Image: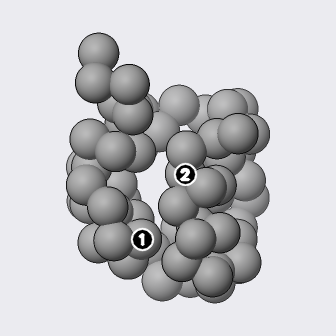
């Protein structure tokens, strides 16, 4: 399962809710979760907002395996 999706579900948020809180479109969030767009290519502020909202680190989202 996609790490972003796992953290979102643990936080009890739907895709539209998280997208609104982060300031991105629902479709963009879907693309990140489905691997259509790499989260590594997102703006740094977007990934930082996601991490803060989801209660994890940027590294947890970008590099979950610690590579």
In the depicted view, which residue is nearer to us: 23 or 54?
Answer: 54
Q: Which residue is mark 1?
A: 54
The crowd level at tag 2 (other Cα within 10 Å; few <14, some 14-19, many 20+) is many
Would residue 24 be found to the left or right of residue 54 on screen? right
Helix, strand or loop at label 2? It is: helix
Which residue corresponds to the image point at 39% horizontal and 34% vertical from the top-left? 64
User: How is colour applied across the structure in the image?
Assistant: one colour
Marked residue nearer the N-terminal end (1 or 2): 2
Q: Quadrant of the C terminus?
A: top left
Q: What numbered label is drawn on residue 41?
A: none
Residue 44 seen anywhere in this rendered image of the structure: yes
Residue 8 in the image, given as x and y percentages of width and height: 58, 67
The residue drawn where x is 71% and y is 78% is 14
Tell me, yes or no, if residue 19 can be seen here: no
**Image-quadrant location for residue 55:** bottom left
Whole-percent x, y for residue 9 in the image: 65, 69
Q: Residue at x 70, y 32 (%)?
A: 36
What numbered label is drawn on residue 4? 2
- Left or right of residue 58: residue 13: right
The residue tagged with tag 1: helix, strand or loop? helix
In the shown orientation, is residue 64 left or right of residue 11?
left
Q: Residue furthest top?
A: 67
Q: Residues within 10 Å of mark 1 (few under 14, many from 20)?
A: many
Position above or below: 55 against 36: below
The quarter of the picture where the N terminus appears is: top right
Q: Dividing the picture into quarters, in which one does residue 17 lie?
A: bottom right
Figure label count = 2
Seen in the picture, residue 58 relative to 20 is either above or below; the reply is above
| Near-viewer residue (26 or 5) | 5
């Amino acid at each position: 399962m996609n790490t972003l999706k796992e953290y979102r579900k643990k936080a009890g948020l739907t895709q539209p809710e998280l997208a609104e809180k982060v300031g991105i479109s629902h479709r963009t969030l879907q693309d990140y979760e489905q691997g259509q767009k790499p989260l590594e290519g997102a703006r740094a502020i977007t990934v930082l907002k996601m991490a803060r909202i989801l209660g994890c680190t940027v590294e947890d989202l970008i590099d979950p395996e610690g590579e």
